[in-house]
Amino acid sequence: MSDRIDWVDYSKGLGIILVVYGHVMRGLISSDVDLSRSAFLISDKIIYSFHMPLFFFLSGLFVEKSLQKDFKSSLISKLKILIYPYIIWSVLQGCLNIFLSSYTNNSTNWLGLLKIAYEPIGQFWFLYVLFFMFLIYQAVRRHLNILYIWILSIILYILSPYIDVFVIKKFAANIVFFISGSFLVSNIDLKADFQKILDHKYLILSTIGFIVLNYLLISSSLSTVYKSLISITAAFLGIYIVIYFSNKIANINKANFIKKLGELSLTIYLLHIFATSGSRIVLYKFFHVEDIFIHIALGTLFGVIFPVCVFMASNKLNLNNFLFGVKK
């Protein structure tokens, strides 16, 4: 597991495009741009049914490596990789939201900025929750079998709708995918044996199941427990579909730009809101563009390209260690 696995980067690349697209759509529905509510609902429900679980799952694939370190070394590593950029970019985005509050949909204020120690701003909740997942996993995994931890994570998922505290709710709703990634690694060699479960007949069944389950989630009134069971199944099916296509793309060595986006997925996640919000503001407020397809296309494109350009520029200026907590 020490070397990069191509299909993981391709999966992250596809996933981060969906993240950017999803935030573009949510930004538009919160603004004055004319967007069909039904089209938004379908798109939003489908994407959010699996795209963040995908990233937790992919992160879980490598969590076993943390067990090779002592707790102090692991803590320092995760503080640098996750919490340092969390603080830097939460402050930057929070300040920008405050200064541009008359143009944006965000209601961040100075008090909210001070509360980032326990109340993440916007998309940064992912880094915050992932940090605690790594640390808690390292503490618990040394004493419990992975199967027991996985069962406990499913119980947490079912209980998550009843939790009111935001970060705890997010933790409970996503830990099962994180643990599932680790569980998979514990039972399958990702480089040697993974191909066996990537079969076109499973893809067909997964796609049909994913469509049917999302239809039920969108169109039916379900009890909380029943909805949780359908949601977790739909999420795993969505993850499988992305990984299947990512593996196929990686094997034929096509679309290398998607792999590159995967390698820079954390950077894109940190910065894309600057670009998506900026694109919407400029197009609508200054150029009076109301065409929804232009907003979606340019918003998604800028949301992906802008962070990559910032990373490349900061790399040349030797600022990546300061801005992103990385040295490359």
Image (spheres, helix red, strand yellow):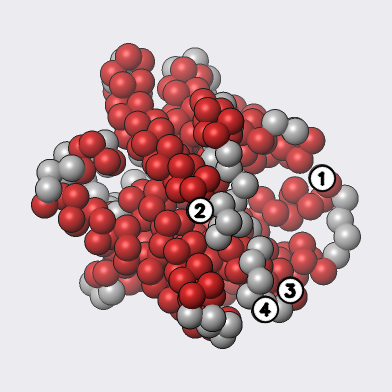
**From the image, which quarter does the N terminus lie in?**
top left
Q: Which residue type carries mark 2? A: Leu
Q: Which residue type carries mark 4? A: Asp
CB of mark 4 within 8 Å of CB of mark 2?
A: no
User: Which corner quadrant of the image does residue 237 belong to?
Assistant: bottom right
CB of mark 2 within 8 Å of CB of mark 1?
A: no
Mark 1 lies on residue: 225
Percent position of residue 69, x then y: 29, 20
Say what secondary structure mark 3 lies in: helix
Rate crowding at label 3 as few (under 14), some (14 to 19) or many (20 or more) other CA atoms within 10 Å: few
CB of mark 3 within 8 Å of CB of mark 1?
A: no
How far, Cα to Cα, is label 2 from label 1? 41 Å
How far, Cα to Cα, is label 4 from label 3? 9 Å
Mark 3 lies on residue: 37
Percent position of residue 109, x then y: 58, 39
How far, Cα to Cα, is label 3 from label 1? 27 Å
Closer to the chain start, of discs 2 and 1, is 2
Closer to the chain start, of discs 4 and 2, is 4
Quick one: 43 or 229, which is closer to the camera? 43
Rate crowding at label 2 as few (under 14), some (14 to 19) or many (20 or more) other CA atoms within 10 Å: few
Circle 2 or circle 3, nearest the eye: 2
Circle 4 or circle 3, nearest the eye: 4
Q: Which residue type carries mark 3? A: Arg
Q: Residue at x 82, y 50 (%)?
A: 226
Mark 2 lies on residue: 100
Closer to the chain start, of discs 4 and 1, is 4
Q: Residue at x 32, y 34 (%)?
A: 81
Mark 4 lies on residue: 34
